[in-house]
Structures are given as structure tokens and as C-alpha cells.
Amino acid sequence: MTITTLRHSSGSSCKIHSFGATVISFATDQEHLFLSNDAILDGSKAIRGGIPLVFPVFGPSTAPSTMPQHGFARVNHWELIESTETTASYTLRLADVTAGRGEHNPWSIEEVVKNGIDVLLKYDVSLGTDHLVTTLTAQNTGKAVFDMEALLHSYFTVSEKAAHDNSRTFIEGLDRYSIVDKVTQESGYVQPVGEPVVISGETDRVYHPSEEKTGAHVQLVTPQRKLYITAEGSNAISCVVWNPGKEKAQAMSDMHDGAHEEFVCVEPGILTDRTIRLQPGDVAFLKQTIKAIAVK
Ligand code: TA6
């Protein structure tokens, strides 16, 4: 298990853990990614913080599949194939996936022998003066078509424990997106124009674009800075906004006390009814750019 550090001459830096190819730090004049003090970094559990990679399913699997929540990408060791001072490229081959395949789904060892599914995942990380670009690509290297979801589960730090302070922490850019609220179980309503998205207690919502937009531009405003999160991909980009709230955070063994006030997850992804159907030989991608602007 290795941690690769990227450094830019401007002073920005980035750290990537080979477990899950999880970016665990992106700093300019300050750290932008949240990593729980209790995160487990020994490869026995998905890393709680940074940017875990979600593939090929988002959320819990549908029965009878026993693939774990968010799929296998975040719980396997990725190979670092190339790096420079400011870039790193990782790959994960299905043949090297030892954890998280589960049973009764097309990715299980038993099924793959019969159906001929194969995939090559690649993850490119590139550091700039004030930005970080992360690109996940999936190439269908097998004989059969497969469906996939993909998401960059980005945890962003919020200083001064202000994640739930709606006047200082909010998300812009999701106007007119339709909402699936997993806490209230409500759906089918849209984010009003000009109204920012705020975190109120436990928050777990998926925002789907009203049009088939293969790009998204979202701004996360916090007391310490504004983050411009731009995403593009091979299908419409949805955006998940998540914070576990106090009780759920306390119940998570790898979340330190009070952590729910220190981060907000803003997660671009290709999800649910926008799932990608990838034919043999085809490539799909999901790219996120995070740009930090200090708030004066
Ligand atoms: O992306 C939001 C979400 O799916 C939430 O429902 C919540 O469970 C979160 O991810 C964290 O999931 P994890 O499996 O990392 O505990």
C-alpha cells in the first residue's frame, strides 16, 4: 500500500492512497478535502474521506446481488502506472479485483466466467496551481455489454464547524435539478431557481439535471473559500449532496466526534436512470475539476 504525493511549483499538493486510488488530500493555501481522523487506511475498509471512487453501482445493490454499497472500485488496490511531479495514473483490472464483487450479479466471479464481462478502469489525477482534475474511465474489455454507474464521492472540508450553518455554507448551481430525497423519501420536486442548497441535519439527496446535460457546474461556498466543482462525462451528470448529521455520524465507527460539522459531500456522478450501457470495446468517462478560490 502506498501514498503518492503530487506537488506543484505554486505550492499546491495532493496525496493519493493506492487503496481505492483514493485522493486523500488536495491543498492550496489550505486543505480542501475532509479525511476523518478515524479513517482506516490499512486497506480493510473504504477510506472515510477524500474522494472514494464509486463503480459499478451507486448505493446499495438491488437484491439478490450482494455486491457491497458503492461497488468494488473503492475497496481494491489500484496499480500506479505512471506519475510525474503533478500527475498520477492508476489502473484496476477486473482480474485483480479481490474484494467487493459479491454474488448474484454480473460482476461476481461465477457470472463473469459465463458472461465474459471484463473491464479496465483507469484513474488520472492532475494537480494545478489552484485546481485538481480527477478523471475515471471505464473500458469494456470483455465480450459482453454491461451497465454501470460511476460517482466521485468527494468529501469537502468546512472550517469553523460550519457545515450546518446555512448562511455560510451552501451549494449553488443546482437550480431546476429534480430531487430524490433519501431522508424524507420525497421526490419529484425541483430545486427552486436562485435558492441555494443547504445542509439541514441529516441530508442525503440526489439532484438530477432537468435536461440531458453531460456537464455540471456547482459551487460550494464555505467560510474559508469557494470551490468550483465542474464535472463532465459520458452521460447526464447528477449530483449527490450528503451529510450524515449528528446521530448517523456518531454511529459510524470511522467518523470522529463532531465530524458531521466539518464536511459536506458534493458528488458528481452518472446514476440511476442515466446508467451507462457500455458495449464491448467502448469507453465511458467521468471527470471532475475542483478549483479553489479563497474568500476574503
Ligand atoms: O453518497 C451518499 C451516500 O450514498 C449516503 O447514502 C451514505 O450512505 C454515504 O453515501 C456514505 O456511504 P458509505 O458506504 O461510505 O458509508
Image (spheres, rainbow, N blue to C red):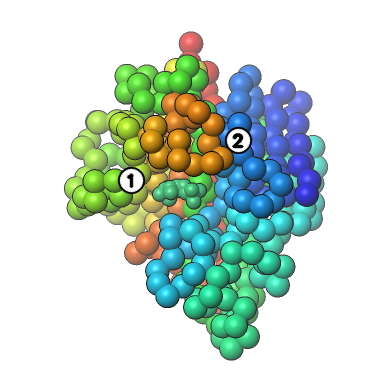
Q: Tag 1, which secondary structure?
A: strand
Q: Are the two marked residues, 2 and 1, in contact with CB atoms closer than 8 angstroms?
A: no
Left or right side of 226 for 165: left
Q: Earlier in the sequence, mark 2 or mark 1?
A: 2
Q: Tag 2, which secondary structure?
A: loop
Per the image, the residue denoted by label 2 is 38
Q: Residue at x 56, y 83 (%)?
A: 111
Residue 177: % across, % down: 28, 46
**Splitting the image into 4 quarters, where does residue 205 fall?**
top left
Report whether residue 70 is seen: yes
Q: Residue at x 52, y 22 (%)?
A: 293
Residue 143: % across, % down: 60, 84
Left or right side of 197 for 121: right
Q: CA distance from mark 2 to mark 1?
A: 25 Å
Left or right side of 29 for 279: left
Please determine whether, in this image, residue 260 is positioned above or below residue 211: above
Please determine whether, in this image, residue 102 is positioned above or below residue 203: below
Q: Residue at x 62, y 71 (%)?
A: 119
Per the image, the residue denoted by label 1 is 205
The residue nearer to you, when weighing 115 against 175, is 115
Q: Mark 2, mark 1: which one is toward the viewer?
A: 2
Residue 48: % across, % down: 57, 42
